[in-house]
Image (tube, rainbow, N blue to C red):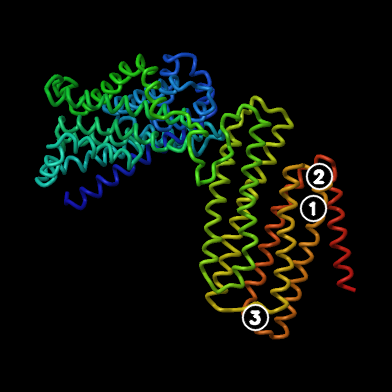
Amino acid sequence: MSSLETLLYLSAGVVLLFWATRLIRTGVERALGTRFREWMMKASANRLSSFGTGLIISILLQSATGTAILARSFIARGVITTIGGLAIMLGADLGSTMVVQLLSLDMSWLLPLALVVGGLLQERSSSRTNKQIGRAVIGVGQMLIALKLIGTASASLSQNETFPAILNLVTGDPLIAILLAAALTWVVHSSVAVVLTIMTLATTGAISVESALLFVLGANIGSSFIPFVLTMNDGPEVRRVMTGNMLFRCIGVIIGAFALLTGLVDFNTFGADPARAVANFHSAFNFGVVVLGLPLAGLMIALCNRLLPERNAADEELPTDRMSLLDRKLLDEPDLAFAAAIREMMHMSEKVEMMLRGVPMAFSTKKTKTVKDLMRLDDEVDDLHRSIKEYLADVNADRMNEDDYQKYAALMNYCVCLEQIGDVIQRNLLNQAKKRAGLRYEFSKDGWREIKQLHTIVLENLQVSIQVMITGDTALARALYNRKLKVRQLEKDSRDAHLRRLQKNLQSSRNTSSMHLETISDLKTINALLTSVAYPILEENGELSISRKKLRSAEGGKKAVGAA
């Protein structure tokens, strides 16, 4: 096998291995996600039950990081204590080694079985849960294929004179070897994939067992760094748990490297077969961290409390950046959580309003910077949409009554509508403005007046819709719905007037024809999104069907007058 083929096989194997572990994790999460959350809720009874919960969930997910993401919201809400959260992470790290243990055995018989069973479940089953289980089983088959690809490439590498020489340079310095494996684990975000790759390379003789064990130590540091970085913007409780887990593993790596390099532990202790040696060392290391960590979890959390203290507003300067109003401590009280979400949504609506107000300026200016500045606001709208939606999804559903659920649905829908409005402005209106500036076209005088008139009423409706969302006032909702007729009529009148200008061969109208028609259509779309906030309120009062009949009747009357 040529060097290029070897590199392709190795790269394909590593990528497929990463994808397979992701496929298994997402399949299991979607099939059993609710049960995971129930297990998490019961996990804070004591350290041992927390440890066991983390162990089981990590085995099923094949990912300690996935377990950390599940646990973070419970830790932030105080449902799981920081000591319990640290015990969960210790269990999760040990659980992820079980996958490596299993695949260190000869599992070639499982490959065709996994693909056939997974494929049948995915394609033939009518149950969503069974389909997701099939997805995970297919992932197991893909993982075995990936290991075969890596094995094929590794066998070729072991016979190559250059590759061992490069590895000797790397593994000649244990610190470099550990840091290299840690960096690789961070890049692929999967310690399971990295350790399985190390195991396969060692099995084929591409790397020595001594080097493989040092790489395993590095993979364990990298795996603890992933959740630490992912939760850097979370509250101090979550960050203390992830920091404590990372510190325990760093201590474990220092002890493990010292024991290996000084001969306190023989490299051959973990098995004569390289695959078994890597798998056993990986499990032994994590078991050692558990033995060290569980009794000392309280001391570690006390240390992390000192490293990451609660912020005292009286002792620090006010931040220059805006602080989110989404207080996660309120998630168990739906009314308070909804109030926080509404305040944050007001800020989101201000960003959308700034974008909408800037549309006429974007069309009338020749400076592309104005358009770019407005487009950047959409990124802020998207970030706010994401944070509000995730916050609302985490509100304690067990404490919601029917009215609370209706409020939850209304807030979630309005948040989505605001985000969609931002997209319409950014992708459609501002891109049209950018296109007009590049072509140096100008709207006709009447056409521009029609666009501005339509824009003004849509902007007014944005402000009305916010009031409807906050107050739930039926009269205001009815007024907002009735204003929909005015927008529809303005859009229709502008379209008809534009077509008449085209018949008169007005050059400015010809040049901007598609821009004009798309702009008024986009403004009508924005208005429809704004009006949707009134639907649940009117429907609850039995007025929606009546309002729609009046709307159709009024439109019919307009058409009759026009025909006459």
150 to 511, vertically: above or below: above
Identify the image quadrant of residue 401.
top right
Q: Position of residue 138 (x, y in %)?
A: 41, 36
Residue 360, image x, y percentages: 64, 68
Q: Amino acid at mark 2?
A: Leu
Alpha carbons under labels 3 and 2: distance apart: 42 Å
Q: The C terminus lies in which quarter of the figure? A: bottom right
Label 2: few (<14), some (14–19) or many (≥20) C-alpha neighbours in 10 Å: many
Q: Is residue 1 left or right of residue 245?
A: left
| Most distant residue in the front direction | 315
Q: Is residue 446 left or right of residue 55?
A: right
Label 2 vs 1, first from the N-terminus? 1
Res. 59 in view: no
Residue at 37%, 18% in the rendered image: 299
Q: Residues within 10 Å of mark 1 (few under 14, many from 20)?
A: many
* N-terminal-most mark, 1 or 3: 1
Number of the label disc, if any, that sits on residue 481:
1
Say if mark 3 contacts mark 2, CB within 8 Å.
Answer: no
At mark 2, the secondary structure is helix
Which residue is depicted at the point 29% across and 30% down? Answer: 220
User: Identity of the amino acid at label 3?
Assistant: Arg
Q: Residue 328, relative to residue 14: is it above or below? A: above
Q: Considering only vertical position in the picture, is 419 above or below 150?
A: below
What is the three-letter code of the residue carrying label 1? Answer: Tyr
Residue 134 seen from this side: yes
- Mark 1 lies on a secondary structure that is helix
Q: Tell me where residue 429 sits by quadrant.
A: bottom right
Of the pair 454 and 377, the residue shown nearer to us: 377
Q: Which mark is residue 538?
A: 2
Q: Which residue is mark 3?
A: 510
